[in-house]
Amino acid sequence: MYPSPASPPVRVLHICQPVDGGVARVVAELAAAQAAAGLRVHVACPPESPLARSLDALPGVRVRPWTASRSPGRTLPSEVRGVRRVVDAVAPDLVHAHSAKAGLAARLALRGAVPTVFQPHAWSFEAADGVTGLLARRWERAAARWSARIVCVSEAEWVTGRRAGIDGRYTVVPNGVDPERFAPADRAAARERLLPPGHPARNGAPLVVCVGRLCRQKGQDLLLEAWPSVTDRFADAQLVLVGDGPEAAPLRARAGRPVTFAGAVADAGPWYQAADVVVLPSRWEGMALAPLEAMACARPVVITDVNGARESLPLVDRERCLVPPENPRALARSLIALLADGGLRDELGARGRRHVLTRHDAERSAEAVTAVYRELLGTVPLKNRECTTT
């Protein structure tokens, strides 16, 4: 058990921006698991945000308001000061900064004064080209000295960091999902609950679902480019985009009639359950949650071969389920192949569910992160190795 009865509870401060999407879900699940394990958990994040609201409902988790934008800019000095104020108020034993913006502000504020875990959830320099990308790489190289540990969500993310010259002590902890929250359910019943009367998918039309923030990273524009080839083969096929984001308006402008925009939802589980195939054509990731959630619901996935994708799939399914990034034609071919074969979809879905249960359970991921805390706080001997895969 951690901590031991003779020891005071460990006080951990998570700092997070962004406040929606996969990163926010990881932070909320991790905070809940750690509070249940006896840690004193505080989370600093923008107030009145989706993440703050979800954390408010968790017993043993205290939300600390921290006003911060998603991207670096003129507000950075005030955000750094905000981190210092929260740290002064909480007096944490350890700080865990999630994603690029929180990692930037937290490490500038603390500079190693408190053991700091940095979890990139996909490297910032993958999202930028030219001078911006170069500056992001230089920052990550410099900031590594203020990171007691860098936690990567996939081996591929670790390799990307090392190749970029980011030296430090790494631990790989694959993302996990809750297999009870994301579980198989009747497809027809899910469609009845989600779709309006008269929607073709309620009468058995093929349904493809994409869950993700509507932004360049997630590649919904590439999916819309591929979609006419799918409807050429399956005239009644329907596509649903679940999520919201900065690209919502341009995506709506280019989408055709068989495309439904469901908006942001608190629980994407029913959408996975309603789908024949779940697709995520990302341009970059650390390890995306949506494919794991879909597989937990026993639904087959089509995903782009970016960081974390291969590791998130059963080995035997990589050829069918992986497509090259930014390749709408390959994306369409893979979707068509799965929509044409119901038996194959069932086989992939069942195997994906078993894979998540054995490799990507959220409880196991939380335990692995807490083991990193134990190591850094000296409750177990430090291991003299550069990268530990859990």
Image (spheres, helix red, strand yellow):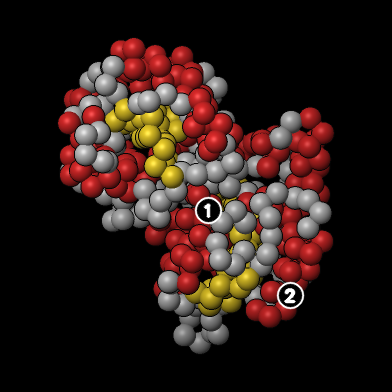
Quadrant the N terminus occupies: bottom left
Say if residue 382 shows up in the picture: no
**Above-or-below relation of 93 to 109:** below
For disc 1, the marked residue is 20
Number of marks in picture: 2
Camera-side residue of 233 and 177: 233
Q: Amino acid at mark 1?
A: Asp
For disc 2, the marked residue is 85
- x and y percent of residue 178 in the render? 35, 55
User: Farthest bottom residue?
Assistant: 6
Q: Secondary structure at mark 2?
A: helix
Q: Who's the residue at 43% across and 76% down the image? A: 59
**Above-or-below relation of 382 to 361:** below
Marks 1, 2: nearer the viewer: 1
Q: Who's the residue at 46% across and 14% down the image? A: 329
Q: Who's the residue at 51% across and 60% down the image? A: 50
Q: Residues within 10 Å of mark 2 (few under 14, many from 20)?
A: some
Q: Who's the residue at 34% across and 17% down the image? A: 231
- x and y percent of residue 47 in the render? 59, 67
Q: Residues within 10 Å of mark 1 (few under 14, many from 20)?
A: many
Q: Amino acid at mark 2?
A: Arg
Say if residue 387 shows up in the picture: yes
Q: Secondary structure at mark 1?
A: loop
Location of residue 257 (image quadrant): top left
Among numbered discs 1 and 2, the one appearing first in the sequence: 1
- x and y percent of residue 115 in the render? 69, 67
Location of residue 83 (image quadrant): bottom right
* In this rendering, position of residue 144 left or right of residue 325: right
